[in-house]
Amino acid sequence: MKKLITIFSAATLLGSCHQPLKESDFVSERITKSATIILNGPPDQVFPLFGAFEERKWSEGWQPILIYPETETIQEGTTFATQGHGEKKFTWIITRYDHRQYLIQYLVYTENRHWTITITCSAHDENKTKATITYDFTGHNSFGNEINQVMLLKMYANELRDWEEEINRYRSQEPGAGARHSVVSSQ
C-alpha cells in the first residue's frame, strides 16, 4: 500500500507541474514565401535532385537519417530526420509525391513549429527547368513563431539563388555535362 501511495503522490506531483498545451496569450502565426529558380537540364533529370537522398549530391552537409521505409525510397510516407539547427531535431515526411507532375511536398516538424516545403518543376526554354519552392511555416508557440520569421528571412535572403547555384554547379560536374552551362557565382 505504501508503494501505491508513493506512486500516486509522484504522479500527482508530476501532474501539477504539467505545462499547458497552449500559452494563454499565444496566437499561432502562419507565414509563406515562394521563389522560382532556373536550373540546367530537363525536369526528368533535375526533379530527382529535390528528393531527400539525392539532395546530398548538391547540398553540402545534408545528412538525412532514414526512418521509413527500410531503403532510401522517395514515396509518400517516406520519413527521415535531420539535425535541428537550434531545436532537437527535424522530422520530415513526404506528404505528396508525383514524379509525373514533378511535384514533391515535405511536412517538417519540431515541438515548436511545423512547415511544408512544396517543390514543383516544369520545362523552361530549351534544356532548362523552372523550379518553384514554397515554404509555409506555422508556429506552435511563441518561440516557434519567432524562429519561423528568422528562418524565412534567412532562407529567402537571396530568393533561393544559392540553391540554383549549388544545383547548377553539381549538374555541370555530372558525367556528360559538356553541353550544359553552369551559373557563375558572384562570390
Image: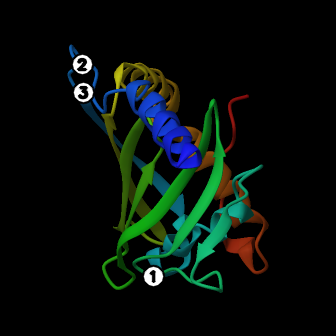
Amino acid type at mark 1: Gln
Instruction: Please say whether residue 174 is visible from this viewpoint.
Output: yes
Q: Are marks 3 and 1 in contact (CB under 8 Å)?
A: no
Q: Position of residue 53 (x, y in %)?
A: 65, 70
Mark 3 lies on residue: 29
Q: CA distance from mark 3 to mark 2?
A: 9 Å
Instruction: For mark 2, give the secondary structure.
Output: loop
Instruction: For mark 1, give the secondary structure.
Output: loop
Image vertical order of residue 130 relative to residue 146, above or below: below
Mark 2 lies on residue: 26
Mark 1 lies on residue: 75
Which numbered circle lies on residue 23?
none
Q: Earlier in the sequence, mark 1 or mark 2?
A: 2
Q: Are marks 1 and 2 in contact (CB under 8 Å)?
A: no
Q: Are marks 3 and 2 in contact (CB under 8 Å)?
A: no
Amino acid type at mark 2: Phe
Q: Nearer the viewer, mark 3 or mark 1?
A: 3
Residue at 61%, 71% in the rendered image? 67
Image vertical order of residue 136 relative to residue 75, above or below: above
Look at the image and tell me in which quarter the C terminus lies: top right
Q: Quadrant of residue 64?
A: bottom right
Q: Nearer the viewer, mark 3 or mark 2?
A: 2
Q: Earlier in the sequence, mark 3 or mark 1?
A: 3
Q: Quadrant of residue 168?
A: bottom right
Q: Quadrant of residue 56?
A: bottom right
Residue at 36%, 19% in the rendered image? 142
Badge 2 crowding class, 10 Å Cα cut-off, few under 14, some 14 to 19, many 20 or more, is few
Name the residue at the top extreme. 25
Instruction: For mark 3, give the secondary structure.
Output: loop
Q: Position of residue 153 (x, y in %)?
A: 44, 23
